[in-house]
Image (spheres, helix red, strand yellow):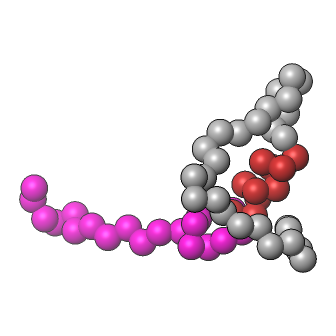
Amino acid sequence: MLTGIQEETPIQRKTTLKWSSDGELSAVDLVRILDRLENPELTQCDLVCNVDEVV
């Protein structure tokens, strides 16, 4: 979604979201979330377990 713009992640990552007084997420934070949801490495994982194994 950020076409043509190189976004650099700062060393100290931002961990808070900004909300407006009417309860809406800020446009910048919404775009960042949507960009990350498009990345399969951040939205998929392999679950490996052996259900027959007794712990």
> Furthest-left residue in view?
54
Q: Residue at x 78, y 48 (%)?
A: 29
Q: Residue at x 81, y 38 (%)?
A: 25
Residue 28 location (% of width, % of height): 84, 50
Q: Is residue 24 left or right of residue 41?
A: right
Residue 53 location (% of width, % of height): 13, 65
Q: Is residue 1 left or right of residue 9?
A: right
> Furthest-front residue in view?
11
> Furthest-bottom residue in view?
4
Q: Write the start and end of the magenta stretch as one range.
A: 37-55
Residue 5 location (% of width, % of height): 86, 72
Relative vertical location of residue 42 with respect to residue 18 in this rendering, above or below: below
Determine the image quadrant of residue 40. Answer: bottom right
Magenta region, main secondary structure: loop
Residue 34 location (% of width, % of height): 76, 58
Q: Residue at x 57, y 66 (%)?
A: 42
Q: Is residue 50 left or right of residue 24?
A: left
Looking at the figure, which quarter contains the N terminus? bottom right
Is 21 included in the stretch rendered in magenta?
A: no
Determine the image quadrant of residue 51. Answer: bottom left
Q: Is residue 24 left or right of residue 50?
A: right
Looking at the figure, which quarter contains the C terminus? bottom left
Relative vertical location of residue 50 with respect to residue 54 in this rendering, above or below: below
Count how many numbered circles sit on residues in the image.
Answer: 0
Decide which of 34, 53 is in the foreground and name it: 34
